[in-house]
Amino acid sequence: MPRHLFDRPQIITAARRILDADGLDALTIRALASDLETGPASVYRHVADRQQLLQLVADDAARELPLPDPALAPRERLHSGWLMLYDFFAGRPWLVDLITAGNVVSDHASPLADAHLQALAELGLDQADRYRTYRSLNALLLGTLCSTHPYAHGAVEAEDSADPTAHESAPREVFAWAVDRLI
Amino acid sequence: MPRHLFDRPQIITAARRILDADGLDALTIRALASDLETGPASVYRHVADRQQLLQLVADDAARELPLPDPALAPRERLHSGWLMLYDFFAGRPWLVDLITAGNVVSDHASPLADAHLQALAELGLDQADRYRTYRSLNALLLGTLCSTHPYAHGAVEAEDSADPTAHESAPREVFAWAVDRLI
DNA sequence: ACCTGAACACCGTTCAAGT
DNA sequence: ACCTGAACACCGTTCAAGT
């Protein structure tokens, strides 16, 4: 009789606990096994390798991707939709790492892409411009989250309110500004 | 008498050879030591740890960052300048990894930032907009390079010229398009 | 004084042995 | 049949021992 039983959902739950607590590097097969009170070898009964584990967690997280509010006018729908995405990823920094470092891409993102492409169509953009805009917004989001990542905020200690205008805005505000320039 | 002598420049040269050949993950202290025909412990005579090694290589590579052509009008200067940056990073994928995964930020980037901020000033943007635009372009570049990274180009095999317009443009073209929308 | 072999504490992954 | 202890081939890093 098996002493420890666990399935993929339990693995994903444990993995996300580790990710939320300590980030992507902390999600080792051994740490995961330890969380499940078993040995590393047992994990391999349920996932092929670490890469598949990361893919599974990314797919799971992608189900929670926020869809834009259909009640809004196209432009506001896009604006608020992309800011929701910003906040979604800002709250899950490990997911950004998963996308950039790991090579995970989830197909759960399709409805989201369709919704934004639809909003861009309602704005009167032709098909080529819709794709270009969508891809640019994606890159802008990912790039903003990547450069924001470092724990150091780039704040200079020896600086006060002497130069008010030149001071860096928060990454989120810059992102919101750039989104409006692209749509 | 020491049998093997090597200094930081030689370490950086060896590190870049490994990076160009096999990417960031291949740059281990042990692989580097092996390249220098010594043991891993000897590397630590010259660098504090792997993180510092990555920082040194990034700083070294940042000296080659392409500056925009001052002979061009501001708008063309920005456009070509950012495309030069795209090509620069596209040819050094490990540098993108270094920026996103490692937490390296080089101060050699300052002249480059100043040049682009200057061009934006010549376009008549106020200080706040100059910074916002610069940071957005940076994010756009980084994000484009991150999502481009995966070796799979997202090309669907079962697809032919049936849907010509909807087909994804090359990342570089989309980037160039978005740059023009931001400046 | 400078260098480095050998060891330590980690990884992902495998497989023969246990139940 | 299913599970897993122990081992293998890697890491980064340290330190006592060698020259």
Image: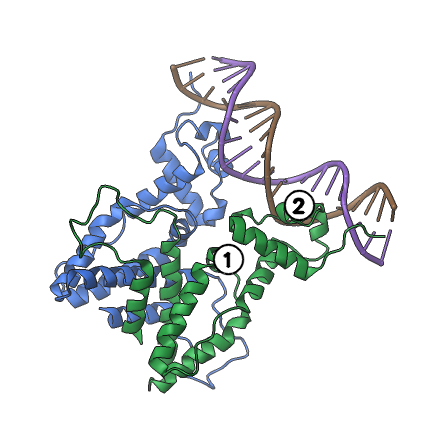
Chain colours: A green, B blue, C brown, D purple
x 24%, y 62%: residue: B132
Say few, some or many: other residues with alpha carbon within 10 Å of mark 1 (under 14 / 14 to 19 / 20 or more): some
x 37%, y 60%: residue: A143
Quadrant where the image shows the C terminus of chain A = bottom left
Mark 2–mark 1 distance (CA, rounded to whole Å): 22 Å
Q: Residue B99: where, in percent of width, then height?
A: 38, 50
- Residue A73, image quadrant: bottom left
Q: Residue B54: where, in percent of width, then height?
A: 40, 42
As drawn, is A97 to the left or to the right of A9? left
Q: Nearer the viewer, residue B91 or B140?
A: B140
As drawn, is A98 to the left or to the right of A147? right
Label 2 is placed on what type of residue?
Answer: Ser
Label 1 is placed on what type of residue?
Answer: Leu
Say few, some or many: other residues with alpha carbon within 10 Å of mark 2 (under 14 / 14 to 19 / 20 or more): few
Residue linked to disc 1: A98
Task: Determine whether B109 is above or below B137 in the image.
Answer: above
Residue linked to disc 2: A34
Task: Give the secondary structure at mark 1.
Answer: helix
Q: Nearer the viewer, residue A104 or C5?
A: A104
Say which chain tag 1 marks.
Answer: A
